[in-house]
Amino acid sequence: MAYIVANANTKLNSQHLRLYLKEKLPEYMIPTAFVFLASLPLTPNGKLDRRALPEPVLDRREDPTGYVAPRTAVEQVLAGIWAEVLRVERVSIHDNFFDLGGHSLMGIRLIDHVCKELQIELPVRRLFECPTVARLAGSLDADLSRATTDRRANSPWRYLIELKPGQGKQPIFFLPGGVGGDHEFLVYARLTHFVGDKYTFYGLRARSADGTELAHPSVEEMATDYLSEMRELQPEGPYFIVAECIGGIVAYEIARQLQSQGQRVGLLALMDTGCPSTAGYLRYRLRRILTPWQESYYVGLRHHLKELKRLNWGARLPYFLSKSKALFRNSPQIAANARLPVPVIDDKDSRRLRRVQEGYIDTLSRYRPRPYDGDVIMLVNEKSHPDDLIRGWPKYIKGKIDLKKIPGDHAAYIRRYVRMVGAALKECLDGVGCLPS
């Protein structure tokens, strides 16, 4: 966000500033919000008082011509929920939820409100399929009287879902991290927005994400099933595939199978995807049997060992002593945590969901890559040390690995720096000639 103190008699608004900055800066550097102040708050020492800066409040009155009032009862309900969740005075029926600053947690909250208010069941992916009040209302008009369970009973499971329509017909296939379900895609909705309007994105979701079906027994079988729907939508290459975190493992195997079928892969972009290995799988199995406090201790220990390796000999002993003192100082709390009972999920459906989702992660963790004769673009976060993320991949990737670093850690880079990630992906897609047709 940007805080602005304008010169006297100067009239500015967010819209004008945003248009001006688009001519001067890349998309990811343009602030998401502008706050106009009479003066900047200062501390007694004359420095900027960041804590006193107000939170941005969207004011739709800046653009009165852009407001379109709700026309139907459903639009009125949705517009009210939109305004409540986004904490704005009013929302035009054509305002994009993500343009107004909506993010994944807000999206989940919004869908929850809609379901309760209209007494329906609605998958969270509907928000990125229909990110405006008008589009969501039009979508709901056709199925408000039916529950999601009824739709599932009458239609087969589909792996492929449309994430964001674009100007071009060439689809970009996206595989999410996490457990591969609908709610994961909300994290990436803003990312696809910042990649640009000309690209059309489709997501591939795991059948095990909602717990109704078991995970595939192998990544190879998973990739084959995904490919059948991909080629139904796009019979011939080139194929453009983007994946994040553990979803990149399936994307890699899809690219391999496409090559074995004589198809061209125009782009394979892996975002923060580590190379699966036997050692990595053993660490995953170990963490499965640890109690929460043991897992926390184990993760911390691995972090400190990595830090020791990177320090020079002179800095290692002070680092070791400082952490040892902290461990001794906190040992009573650690012992107390060890005696705490581990939470038990008694709900039968919750236990099944967790088992099925863990089966999906287990399947991906057991995968062992085979050679891929093509180039790969890797976007990695800087905090997790890029060398750790690409270690192992050069053994299998026979083409060029193009490494692009993004600020932040694994959790922050895709959220806090989403504009930068979107700009990097757009550059990749433009560079390989993925243009509207």
Image (cartoon, rainbow, N blue to C red):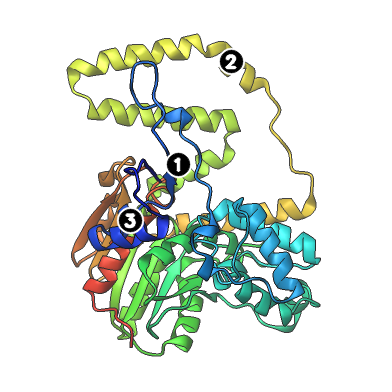
| Residue annotated with mark 1 | 283
> Which disc is residue 28 wearing?
3
In the depicted view, which residue is nearer to us: 203 or 369?
A: 203
Q: Sequence order check: which comes first, mark 3 or mark 2?
A: 3
Of helix, strand and loop, which one carries label 3?
A: helix
Distance from the alpha carbon under mark 3 to that under mark 2: 43 Å
Residue 10: x, y in percent?
Answer: 34, 49
**Neighbourhood count class around disc 3 (C-alpha, 10 Å): few under 14, some 14–19, many 20 upward:** some
The disc labelled 1 sits on which kind of residue? Arg
Q: From the viewer's perspective, is 337 left or right of 7?
A: right
Residue 380: x, y in percent?
Answer: 31, 51
Q: Sequence order check: which comes first, mark 2 or mark 1?
A: 1
Q: From the viewer's perspective, is 47 left or right of 116?
A: left
Residue drawn at 78 percent across, 62 percent down: 117
Of helix, strand and loop, which one carries label 2?
A: helix
Residue 13: x, y in percent?
Answer: 41, 55
Which of the 4 image quadrants contains residue 38?
Answer: top left
In the depicted view, which residue is nearer to us: 383 or 80?
A: 80
Q: Sequence order check: which comes first, mark 3 or mark 1?
A: 3
Report the mark closest to the observer, 2 or 1.
2
Which of the 4 image quadrants contains residue 341?
Answer: top right
Distance from the alpha carbon under mark 3 to that under mark 1: 36 Å
Distance from the alpha carbon under mark 2 to that under mark 1: 25 Å
Instruction: Point out the image quarter for the C terminus.
Output: bottom left
| Residue annotated with mark 2 | 333
